[in-house]
Image (spheres, rainbow, N blue to C red):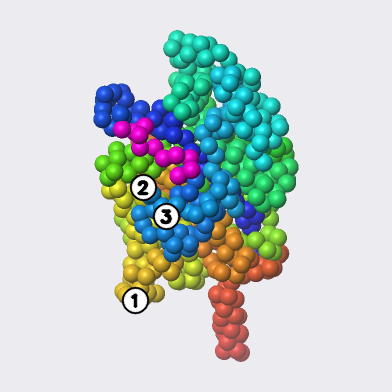
Amino acid sequence: MSYPVIKGAGYVLVHTPDMIIHNGTTQTSERIMNPESEYLKAVPNNIRSYEEVVSYPPNQTYIGGITPEELNANYEMPWAGKSVEGAERFAKYGEIMPQAEFIGLMQASDAFDLVKLESAFAAEAKAQLEAHPLVTEYITSKIKEGEELSVIEDLIANHHAEALYHDGKVVGCVKRAHEIDVNLNAHVIFENLVVKASGILSMLNLIAKNNIDATEIEYVIECSEEACGDMNQRGGGNFAKAIAEATGCINATGSDTRGFCAAPTHALIEAAALVKSGVYKNVAIVAGGASAKLGMNGKDHLKKELPILEDVLGGFAVLVSENDGVNPILRTDLVGRHTVATGSSPQAVITSLITAPLDKGNLKITDIDKYSVEMQNPDITKPAGAGDVPAANYKMIAALGVKRGELQKADVATFGSKHGLPGWAPTQGHIPSGVPYIGFCRDAMLNDEIKRAMIVGKGSLFLGRMTNLFDGVSIVIEKNDGKVGADQGVSEEEVKKLVAEAMRDFASHLLGN
């Protein structure tokens, strides 16, 4: 069986200090409910600088500046206030973009003349993007000369436009795309352009960091949490094809996959299935960031005398391709899924996502070198009362290992350090869910450091008020054994099983004679 491979990954963050204040739902909700609140007054004075964001250890881990192992070994928690010496904007897997450039990229992503920028700011943003090593002339040519500030202020005051801020000042706006359609109002268009622009940046980094020919990508799956459409089809899409258009994927089509936090792992499995079936040779999955989640736990952070730690948008892109005998394979036969009948107890969830796929391959829990679960940054979640999310997942996996007789009780305390990872991803919903490790996983397998890993995505479907169900899927990634073709991917356990069956058949034949 010839399995598809992971050909490369790209990861980006975007520092958006003004968007925290004006677009994060915690802050916008507070402004409606309690406009004179002390929290709102305190927010502007508790936002980190771009330099602090770039040097923040979890952020450097996300873009590949340091490894998860280095984060764990060299930086004592809490990480807030600590810096990676010599940290830079660009790293192995991606980059951390500043806000001004990103606003320019939002206008470059706008196909319907809905983003208006003030003249001087537009010129500044365009100049910065033109100096960007990955942004193409096709993209920068979309940035317009700009408008007088008075024109922009009139659109905001009298025509329902959403303001764009930089350094506390209005520098532009996003116009509504329809007079009465709530799905095309300025706020929704703003959020969708944030997704598209950060998705474009993710795809550009995937292509450049892995020497990928964009014209060979045949299908794109976008798996963020927003939905674009109009009053007749509010989630009709298609972010995927829009991102493909902007990044030179001229031979690609695509579609959007939605599943709350679990969507990226759903998309990874879908991409693997499309390639394994032979429908497409190269499938990219990509996701942009969620402006709504900026400063989501800000109140708890300020209570603990921390800065606003949810100050970045996140994005990623991964390419899944035909087996090349080199890159790690996606074991499409070892997929876990939380079904309708699974239930929501921790044991049932872990059984469906972890041990069920392992049992298919006659594998033990300890046969997986690294589990990438919900890689939430505990710096963010612990002050908010959610604890260390990855650590809690590893304890549950280890406890099930004890129940199965594959671990001793004493192993539970060390399981996380041996088979787990520290959480380093921003709380952007879908962004932490399993996929932040894919780049590191690929490198570790190419360097013969690990043999197997499992990517686990979970989602809270009840947030959509359509069902109370939980959701989750998982897939095993394995080091490539170099065999390409029908015999590739047969594990040692499968060989033993085949030999045992052959011996039983032979013995039965002898006894029959």
Secondary structure beneath label 3: loop
Residue at which label 2 appears: 380
Name the residue at 67% across, 33% down: 130
Q: Which residue is mark 3?
A: 423
Image-quadrant location for residue 107: top right
- Label 1 secondary element: loop
Describe residue 218's horizontal placement relative to residue 508 as left or right. right
Mark 1 surroundings within 10 Å by alpha-carbon count, few (fewer than 14), some (14 through 19), many (20 or more): few
Where are the magenta residues, as a range? 42-52
Label 2 vs label 1: CA separation? 32 Å
Against 167, residue 485 (above or below) is below
Q: Amino acid at mark 1?
A: Gln
Q: Of all residues shown, which one is farthest toward the front?
A: 86
For marks 1 and 3, give the CA distance: 25 Å
Query: Which residue position is annotated with label 1?
Result: 408
- Relative placement, left or right, of 299 versus 241 is left
Residue 350 is situated, as x and y percent measured from the top left of the image, at 38, 59
- The main secondary structure of the magenta stretch is helix
Residue 37 on image: x %, y %: 26, 27
The answer for how far apart the CA atoms under marks 3 and 2 are is 10 Å
In this view, the residue in front, 80 or 366, is: 80
Tell me: 347 left or right of 448: left
Q: Nearer the viewer, mark 2 or mark 1?
A: 2
Residue 178 visible from this viewpoint:
no
Taking 38 as reference, is 396 above or below it? Answer: below
Q: Secondary structure at mark 2?
A: helix
